[in-house]
Image (cartoon, rainbow, N blue to C red):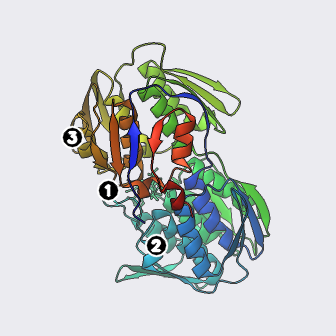
C-alpha cells in the first residue's frame, strides 16, 4: 500500500520514555511455528505490523483460523493443513514467509513454496535451507522459482551449516520437530529469534535441546499440544530508538527491553561517548554528557552488531564529526540509505560493503525509503536536521515499527502523516 510521506521537523532533542514493541523477527517464526500444532495457541506480544498481517494472510491460505484477543494477543488454530503450497503473491512480500516450508513439510509431508521476498537490497540466497533439508532426508526440487519439498518418513541425521543463518536454522528446526527421528544441527544460529522459537516449541511439548548454542538437537515428537507464549522484546526496534536518542544528543529511556540482547549496541554507543544505564528491563541512553566520537563498526550475526541496525548507525555517524568506517559483510548490498543521506548532505563514500563516513551537520531534503531499516535511518537523519524533511516510502516502515508517528510524538518529535492510522487497518 502506498502511503503519504512523513513530515519531520528536526533539530531539537527528544525527551522521555518509550516502550519497545515485541520482536517482529521473533513473532513471525513463532506464528509460523504454531502450524505444527492442531490445538489452539495463544500468543502475546505480537506487534501490529504489516508483516504480521502478511503472514496471517499466508496462514489463512494454509488453514489457520486467527483472532485478535487483545491489542497484541493473537489466537491461532490450525486443525488441518488445507493447502500445502505458499503462493508467490504472499511469499514474495517478505523473507520470513519462506520458513513455512519447514512447517508445512513437518505437518503435511510435502510443501511447495516460492522463492522468498523481503527487503530487496540484494541477493538473499536460501541454499543453506535447501542443503539442510536435503541432508536430513527431504527430497527438494526447484522449478520456476518454486521449491517443492517432500519427505517419506521423519527427518533425521546431522547437518552442519556452512555459515550462520537465522532463517535456515528456523526452517530446519520446524521441519524436524514432528516425527520420530533425531536431527542435529551444527553451526546453528544462536540468534535471540531462534532461541525464542525453540522455547515456544518446547512449551508446546517439542524436544529441542541446545537453544542459544551452535549445536541444536531436535528429537521428533508425535504431536504438539496447544499453549500460550509471550514473544521477546524487539531488540532492533529498541536499538533504533537508542540510536535516535544518540543522533539527537538526547536523554531517552527505553522500557520493555532485554538489556542483554542489546549489548553490542550499548557497547558501541558507549565507545562513542554516550552514557548507557541499564535497569530491570530498561535502558537509559544519555547523549547529552559529552561530544560524540566517531567509531568503526562491522556487522556480525548475534551477539555481534546487527545488520538490521547498520543503516540507522550509519545515519547517526553521518552526524558525528570525524571519520567512521562501517562495514556490513552480513548483507554487503544493504546500502539503499546512502544515496538518500547524500541528499541531506551526508559525506559517505562506498567501496564494496564499506562505508567511510565523514560526519557533520545534515540538512532537510525530500528523501525516499527503499526498505525498512533504510527508512528508519532516514527518520534518524531527519530528526537531526533543522527544518522539514519529507520522507517517502513509508509503507516499509510499517513492516517493522508499530504506531511510529504516535510514539515519536511521545518523545517530543514534530511529525505528521495524515493517513498513518490507516496503515494498520
Ligand atoms: C525475518 C527475519 O528474521 N529476518 C532477519 C534474518 O534474515 P535471514 O534469516 O534471511 O538472514 P540469515 O541469517 O539467513 O542470513 C545471514 C547471512 O547468511 C547468508 N545466507 C543465508 C541463508 C542461506 O541459505 N544462504 C546464505 O548465504 C545471507 O546472505 C546473509 O549473508 O536475519 C538477518 C540477519 O540477522 C536479518 O537481517 C533479518 O532481518
Ligand atoms: C530485513 C528485515 O526483514 P526481512 O528479513 O523480512 O526482509 C528486517 O527486519 O530488518
Residue 223, quarter of the rendered image: bottom right
CA distance for labels 1 and 2: 17 Å
- Furthest residue to the front? 418
Give the left or right position of residue 294, taking residue 99 as reference: left
Q: Quadrant of ligand 1?
A: bottom left
Q: Residue at x 71, y 30 (%)?
A: 280
Q: Which mark is residue 91?
A: 2
CA distance for labels 2 and 3: 32 Å
Q: Badge 2: how crowded within 10 Å, few (<14), some, or many (20+)?
A: many
**Residue 28 place in picture, x, y as percent:** 58, 61
* Residue 298 visible in this rendered orientation of the protein: no
**Camera-side residue: 162 or 197?**
197
Residue 217, quarter of the rendered image: bottom right
The answer to whether residue 352 is above or below residue 186 is above
| Precedes in sequence: disc 2 or disc 3 | 2
CA distance for labels 3 and 1: 15 Å
Q: Residue at x 41, y 28 (%)?
A: 247
Q: Secondary structure at mark 3?
A: strand
* Residue where numbered disc 1 is placed: 121
| Precedes in sequence: disc 1 or disc 2 | 2
- Within 8 Å of ligand 1, the CB of disc 3? no
Q: Which mark is residue 64?
A: none
Amino acid at each position: 500500500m502506498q502511503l503519504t510521506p512523513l513530515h519531520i521537523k528536526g533539530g531539537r532533542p527528544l525527551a522521555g520514555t518509550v516502550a519497545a514493541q515485541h520482536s517482529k523477527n521473533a513473532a513471525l517464526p513463532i506464528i509460523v511455528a504454531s502450524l505444527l500444532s492442531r490445538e489452539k495457541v495463544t500468543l502475546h506480544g505480537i506487534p501490529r505490523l504489516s508483516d504480521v498481517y502478511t503472514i496471517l494472510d499466508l496462514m489463512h491460505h494454509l488453514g489457520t483460523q486467527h483472532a485478535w484477543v487483545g491489542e497484541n494477543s493473537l489466537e491461532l488454530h490450525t486443525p488441518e493443513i488445507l493447502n500445502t503450497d505458499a503462493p508467490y503473491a504472499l511469499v514474495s512480500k517478505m523473507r520470513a514467509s519462506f520458513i513455512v516450508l519447514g512447517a508445512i513439510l513437518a505437518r503435511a509431508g510435502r510443501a511447495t513454496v516460492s522463492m522468498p521476498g523481503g527487503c530487496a537490497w540484494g541477493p538473499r540466497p536460501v541454499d543453506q535451507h535447501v542443503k539442510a533439508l536435503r541432508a536430513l532426508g527431504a527430497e527438494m526440487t526447484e522449478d520456476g522459482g518454486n521449491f517443492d519439498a517432500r519427505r517419506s518418513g521423519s527427518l533425521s541425521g546431522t547437518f552442519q551449516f556452512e555459515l550462520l543463518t537465522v532463517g535456515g536454522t528456523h526452517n530446519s528446526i520446524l521441519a524436524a520437530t514432528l516425527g520420530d527421528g533425531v536431527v542435529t544441527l551444527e553451526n546453528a544460529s544462536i540468534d535471540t529469534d531462534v532461541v525464542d522459537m525453540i522455547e515456544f516449541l518446547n512449551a508446546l511439548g517439542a524436544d529441542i535441546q541446545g537453544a542459544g548454542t551452535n549445536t541444536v538437537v531436535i528429537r521428533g515428537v508425535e504431536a504438539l499440544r496447544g499453549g500460550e507464549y509471550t514473544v521477546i522484546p524487539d531488540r532492533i526496534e529498541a536499538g533504533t530508538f537508542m540510536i535516535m536518542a544518540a543522533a539527537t544528543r538526547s536523554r531517552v529511556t527505553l522500557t520493555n527491553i532485554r538489556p542483554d540482547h542489546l549489548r553490542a549496541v550499548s557497547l558501541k554507543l558507549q565507545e562513542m561517548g554516550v552514557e548507557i544505564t541499564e535497569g530491570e528491563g530498561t535502558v537509559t541512553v544519555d547523549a547529552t554528557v559529552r561530544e560524540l566520537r566517531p567509531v568503526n563498526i562491522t556487522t556480525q550475526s548475534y551477539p555481534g552488531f546487527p545488520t538490521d541496525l547498520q543503516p540507522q548507525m550509519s545515519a547517526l555517524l553521518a552526524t558525528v564529526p570525524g571519520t567512521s568506517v562501517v562495514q556490513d559483510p552480513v548483507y554487503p548490498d544493504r546500502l539503499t540509505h546512502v544515496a538518500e543521506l547524500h541528499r541531506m548532505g551526508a559525506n559517505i563514500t562506498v567501496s564494496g560493503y564499506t562505508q567511510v563516513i565523514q560526519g557533520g551537520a545534515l540538512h532537510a531534503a525530500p528523501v525516499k525509503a527503499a526498505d525498512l531499516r533504510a527508512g528508519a535511518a532516514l527518520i534518524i537523519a531527519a530528526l537531526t536536521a533543522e527544518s522539514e524533511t519529507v520522507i517517502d516510502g513509508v509503507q516499509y516502515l510499517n513492516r517493522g515499527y508499530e504506531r511510529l508517528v504516535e510514539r515519536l510524538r511521545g518523545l517530543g518529535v514534530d511529525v505528521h502523516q495524515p493517513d498513518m492510522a490507516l496503515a494498520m487497518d
